[in-house]
Amino acid sequence: MATPARQTLRQMERTETLAATDAGIARAADLLREGRLVAFPTETVYGLGGNAARDETVARIFEAKGRPRFNPLIAHVPDIAAAERIALFDPDARALASAFWPGPLTMVLPLRDGAAISPLVTAGHRTVAVRLPAHPVARALLAAFGGPVAAPSANPSGRVSPTRAEHVLAGLAGRIAAVVDGGACAVGVESTIVSLGDAPRLLRPGGVPVEVIEAALGRPVPPGGSELAPSAPGQLASHYAPGAAVRMGARGAETGEILVGFGPVRGDFTLSETGDLVEAAANLFHILREADALAGPDGRIAFAPVPDKGLGRAINDRLRRAAAPR
Ligand code: TXA
Ligand code: MG
């Protein structure tokens, strides 16, 4: 009878909030070396980091998030040399790395033989997702740690991604060793994921608009076979889910709805009054949380239409998942 309570106690730990200073980053790197979990800021969202070479640490990441399945994770590296130690780069990959790294692009590449990457990071695939983030705190931490860091977004599975340290603590306090507080994330939606190989494929729209990637490659990058790109709306996995129900494409609020505006549609909150997609992406997850708090249990949130181009594709992708049946 006492077992569940004891298990809960065993899982709880004191979560340190570390300043984004040399001392805070050094402490965070020490914790990573001990195999502990540390949330850290990237330019997209906060990541829940752990040593990507250690099976037990990677398993703890899934446990801390309450992830029902072992989805593959992104390996974060401080520089291109570190990326080339774990993955095989072809000319397309090199072109994208030089155009967009450091920055919000993740590439799925063939795993290098003998790479020090836990098979839990790749979910046993022969490919690995690699990302070189632009955030100075992320880069300093990755350099200080000195190895690849597996990091999904630092939120409980299926919930809204965190763009501030307080969002991380709201979801994961007591389940991770520390969070490095680097303030609000500038991009606000996760990295774009592209798989390379025979033909480039878009696995997830994100912080680098796919149109810009296509221009850099001189080739189309169509949506690819991934659980992240379901072929029919009914297959959309619920994700990024607030407590409230979400409706998209709203020109105004219906009774009882909290309205999130964009451009000419003014709401209780507004993603961007000037219709700026960069500003809207940066505000998206914070406003989703604030609107959720205002809507209350069983509340409803309506979002004004956002154009489906540039960063608008990533915004609409996240909103469709927030609106998906649960
Ligand atoms: O911006 C971001 O990418 C953030 C920050 C923290 O870097 N990270 C992030 O990680 O969004 P996560 O775990 O929430 O999303 C990673 C996605 C997974 O859903 C997975 O399906 C895909 O990347 N992925 C990882 N490795 C893959 C692989 N080898 N093949 C296909 N997809 C892969
Ligand atoms: Mg996530």
Image (tube, rainbow, N blue to C red):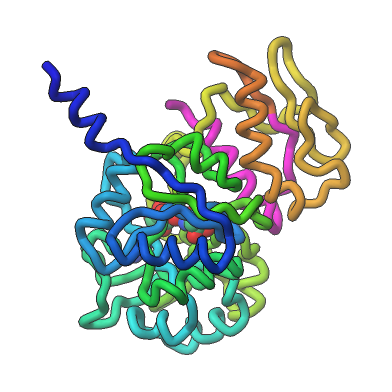
**Vertical order, 121 against 39 (above or below):** below
Indicate left or right for 35 with 152 as reference: left
- Percent position of residue 25, x then y: 50, 65
Q: Position of residue 125 (x, y in %)?
A: 25, 65
Magenta stretch holds residue 315: yes
The quadrant of the picture occupied by the N terminus is: top left
Which residue is at a point 37% across and 71% down the rendered structure image? 148
Residue at figure coordinates x 22%, y 64% from the top left: 119
**On the rendered structure, is 107 left or right of 115?**
right
Q: Quadrant of the C terminus?
A: top left
**Residue closest to the eye, 165 or 280:** 165
In front of the other: 19 or 97: 19
Note whether residue 190 is visible.
no
| Residue plotted at (21% across, 81% down) | 114
Query: Which residue is nearer to you in this view: 174 or 319?
Result: 174
The front one of 316 and 164 is 164
Residue name at image x 46 percent, y 53 percent: 39
Q: Magenta part of the protein: which range? A: 303-326
